[in-house]
C-alpha cells in the first residue's frame, strides 16, 4: 500500500473528516471516488414490469379511485428500485431523469385540466373513444398513437367511448424537480372545453411532413398526435434497406417545425424488430424506457436476460450494455433522455467489440406478479 493510501486511512484524516462534518462541511478527498467516476455509474437499475401485473393493478385501482375522488389521474408509475432511497423525487423516478406510468380512463370519466412546468407525452396502448384536450384542442386517441403535451399548456382528458382506455405517460419530472423548476396549476373550470375543431393539428398536418406555411415559428410541436398508421408507413419504408445493427428499423418522432425531438426534453422512438433479428450490443449515456407494443422477445442488459411480450415495460439504465432479440415480429415504443444529454453535451456511445458484439448471458430476470 502506498504512503498516500496509508495516510488517507490514518486516524488523523478520519478525525478531521468527522470534525468538519459537524459544521455541514464536506471532505472532497472522500467524495471524489463516489461523484467523479471514470464512466457513468447510474443508481437506476434494469427492471421489467409485466403486462399481467399492470392490468391487474389498474383494474383494482378502478374500483378505488376515480379522477374526481382520490386524485386527478388514475395513474400507476414505474418506480425504479435503485432510486427508492433518493427521496423525495426518487419516489417518482423510472430513470434518474424520466418518469413513466400507465393511466386508465373509464367510459364517461373526465380527468380535469391542469398545467405544469414538466413536459409530457403519451403512447396509447389499449382502447378507443377517449380524448385529450390540450390548450383548447380536443384530440381523439387510438391504439398506437403518440401524443405530445408541451410544458405549461392546459391539458385534461375525457372519455366518450364504450371501453376502457389505457396509455403510457412519460414526463421529465425527476429532472425538473432536481433543478428546482417545478410549477403546477389546476384549471379552475375542471375540464377545459374546446375552442378549435377536433383533431385540429392532425387535420392541418394531413400531408405528413409537408409543413403548413407559417408553422416554422413554432418551438413546441404544432402536431399534437402522431398517428400509428403513419408511423408504420415510415417503418415499412425503412424495410427496403438493411436494418441498423443496433436499432433494427427505428424511427424518431420529431417536431416538424424544428426537426428536433417532438418533445424538447424527452426523445421518443418506435422500433421494429423482425422475427429472429438479434441486434448487436452497445451502451450509451442516455437511458431508455421501453413499452412492448407488439410481439415478444428478450433483451440482455449487462448480462441479464429480460424476456418481454406485448404489454410489458422495461428499463435500460444509462451506460448499460444491451441488445435485443425478437421471437416474432415486434414493435417497441421507447422514450429516452437524449435531448437532456445533448443539451449538456454528455451523449456518448460505445459498441461491444468482444464475442462478435454479443454479451454472455449470466442470469435471467424474474418479474414480480402476485
Image: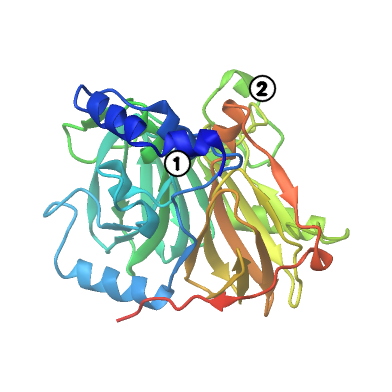
Task: Name the one closer to the observer, 104 or 3.
Answer: 3
Count of all numbered marks drawn on residues in the image: 2
Q: For residue 139, what is the image quadrant?
A: top left
**Structural distance between the alpha carbons of marks 2 and 1:** 35 Å
**Mark 1 residue element:** loop
At which x and y percent is residue 169?
A: 40, 51
At which x and y percent is residue 331?
A: 63, 66
Q: Which residue is mark 2?
A: 213
Q: Which residue is mark 1?
A: 97
Dot 1 surroundings within 10 Å: few (below 14), some, or many (20 or more)? many
Q: Quadrant of the C terminus?
A: bottom left
Q: Residue at x 45, y 52 (%)?
A: 44
Label annotation for residue 212: none
Tag in front: 2 or 1: 1
Indicate left or right for 355 with 26 as reference: right
Task: Name the one closer to the observer, 361 or 66.
Answer: 361
**Mark 2 residue element:** loop
Q: Is residue 301 above or below residue 205?
A: below
Indicate left or right for 91 with 132 as reference: left
Amino acid at each position: 500500500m502506498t504512503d498516500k493510501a496509508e495516510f488517507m486511512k490514518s486516524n488523523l484524516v478520519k478525525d478531521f473528516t468527522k470534525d468538519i462534518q459537524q459544521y455541514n462541511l464536506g471532505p472532497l478527498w472522500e467524495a471524489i471516488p463516489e461523484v467523479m467516476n471514470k464512466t457513468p455509474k447510474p443508481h437506476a437499475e434494469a427492471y421489467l414490469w409485466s403486462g399481467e401485473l399492470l392490468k391487474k393493478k389498474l383494474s383494482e385501482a378502478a374500483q378505488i379511485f376515480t379522477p374526481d375522488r382520490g386524485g386527478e389521474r388514475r395513474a400507476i408509475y414505474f418506480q425504479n428500485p435503485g432510486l427508492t432511497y433518493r427521496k423525495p423525487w426518487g419516489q417518482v423516478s423510472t430513470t434518474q431523469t424520466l418518469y413513466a406510468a400507465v393511466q386508465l380512463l373509464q367510459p364517461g370519466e373526465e380527468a380535469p385540466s391542469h398545467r405544469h412546468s414538466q413536459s409530457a407525452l403519451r403512447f396509447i396502448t389499449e382502447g378507443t373513444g377517449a380524448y385529450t384536450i390540450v390548450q383548447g384542442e380536443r384530440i381523439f386517441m387510438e391504439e398506437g398513437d403518440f401524443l405530445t403535451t408541451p410544458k405549461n399548456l392546459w391539458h385534461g382528458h375525457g372519455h366518450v367511448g364504450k371501453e376502457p382506455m389505457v396509455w403510457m405517460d412519460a414526463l421529465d419530472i425527476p429532472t425538473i424537480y432536481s433543478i428546482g423548476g417545478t410549477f403546477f396549476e389546476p384549471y379552475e373550470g375542471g375540464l377545459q372545453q374546446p375552442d378549435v375543431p377536433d383533431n385540429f393539428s392532425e387535420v392541418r398536418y394531413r400531408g405528413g411532413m409537408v409543413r403548413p406555411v407559417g408553422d416554422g415559428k413554432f418551438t413546441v410541436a404544432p402536431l399534437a398526435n402522431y398517428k400509428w398508421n403513419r408511423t408504420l408507413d415510415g417503418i415499412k419504408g425503412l424495410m427496403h434497406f438493411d436494418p441498423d445493427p443496433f436499432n433494427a428499423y427505428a424511427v424518431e418522432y420529431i417536431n416538424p417545425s424544428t426537426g428536433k425531438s417532438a418533445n424538447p426534453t424527452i426523445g421518443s422512438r418506435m422500433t421494429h424488430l423482425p422475427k429472429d433479428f438479434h441486434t448487436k450490443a452497445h451502451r450509451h449515456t442516455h437511458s431508455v424506457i421501453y413499452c412492448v407494443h407488439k410481439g415478444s422477445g428478450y433483451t440482455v442488459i449487462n448480462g441479464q436476460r429480460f424476456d418481454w411480450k406485448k404489454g410489458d415495460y422495461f428499463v435500460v439504465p444509462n451506460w448499460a450494455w444491451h441488445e435485443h432479440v425478437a421471437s416474432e415480429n415486434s414493435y417497441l415504443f421507447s422514450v429516452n433522455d437524449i435531448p437532456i444529454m445533448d443539451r449538456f453535451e454528455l451523449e456518448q456511445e460505445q459498441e461491444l467489440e468482444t464475442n462478435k458484439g454479443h454479451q454472455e448471458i449470466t442470469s435471467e430476470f424474474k418479474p414480480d406478479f402476485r
